[in-house]
Image (cartoon, rainbow, N blue to C red):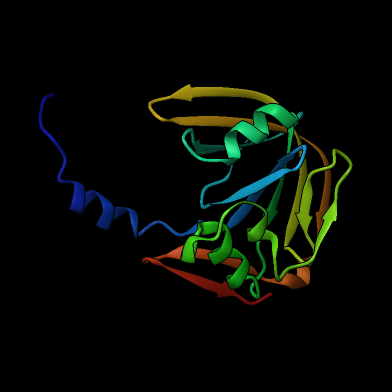
Amino acid sequence: MSESVDKQAFREGLKAFAGNISVITAAHGREASGIVCTSVVSPSAEPPLLMAAINAGGHTLPLIRDAGCFGWSSLGAGHEAVARAFSGFGGVEGEERYAGAEWETAVTGARLLKGAAAGFDCVTQEIIDRDGWSIVIGRVVAVRNDPGAGGMIWWRGGFRALDA
């Protein structure tokens, strides 16, 4: 089929999806970065796996490759400022994205957001490169939950807090 989809219509259609807001963190040596991820897939509970698509041209993917691990924090209702920082709003990059929030060091050395609805400490199991994106699959080695944190989603072009 050679028909092309209207890009604007496609983007508008995607706004109907409600996506969990998570922050994926990575560091190697003196460098640290992270991104907001609005889609989480768990392809398996045994072994416990998480999967995300990450922009291959960004700063986070090379750190995940080099460190061999990453943190995955599912944001709580009160974490919009963290979501904005890790989205890069205002040109915030690298280590600056971590400012203004409390972090803890997980078993692998990755950082997890304190007070997040859930935190997953992951070792990198596989990275699959496709068309400017990389699918990162992490094996979860530790989990931390806070059922009172509520949640954060992205819907209709904006962050939405969900109370617990």
Hey, which residue is sitting farthest right in the picture?
107
Relative side of 57 to 68, left or right:
left
Relative side of 116 to 56, left or right:
right
Relative side of 70 to 52, left or right:
right
Q: Quadrant of the C terminus?
A: bottom right
- Which quadrant of the view contains residue 43? top right
Q: How far across and down, in percent of the image, does residue 91 sit?
A: 48, 61
Instruction: Residue at 63%, 59% (x, y): give it.
Output: 97
Q: Is residue 103 visible?
A: yes
Q: Quadrant of the N terminus?
A: top left
Residue nearer the viewer, 55 or 160: 55
Q: Is residue 45 visible?
A: no
Q: How far across and down, in percent of the image, does residue 62 sit?
A: 61, 32
Instruction: Residue at 49%, 69% (x, y): give it.
Output: 159
73 in relation to 78, above or below: above
Q: How far across and down, in percent of the image, does residue 85 sit?
A: 57, 63
91 in relation to 56, above or below: below
Q: How far across and down, in percent of the image, does residue 123 sit?
A: 76, 32
Instruction: Residue at 73%, 68% (x, y): give it.
Output: 101
Instruction: Residue at 67%, 54% (x, y): give it.
Output: 95
61 in relation to 8, above or below: above
Residue nearer the viewer, 48 or 101: 101
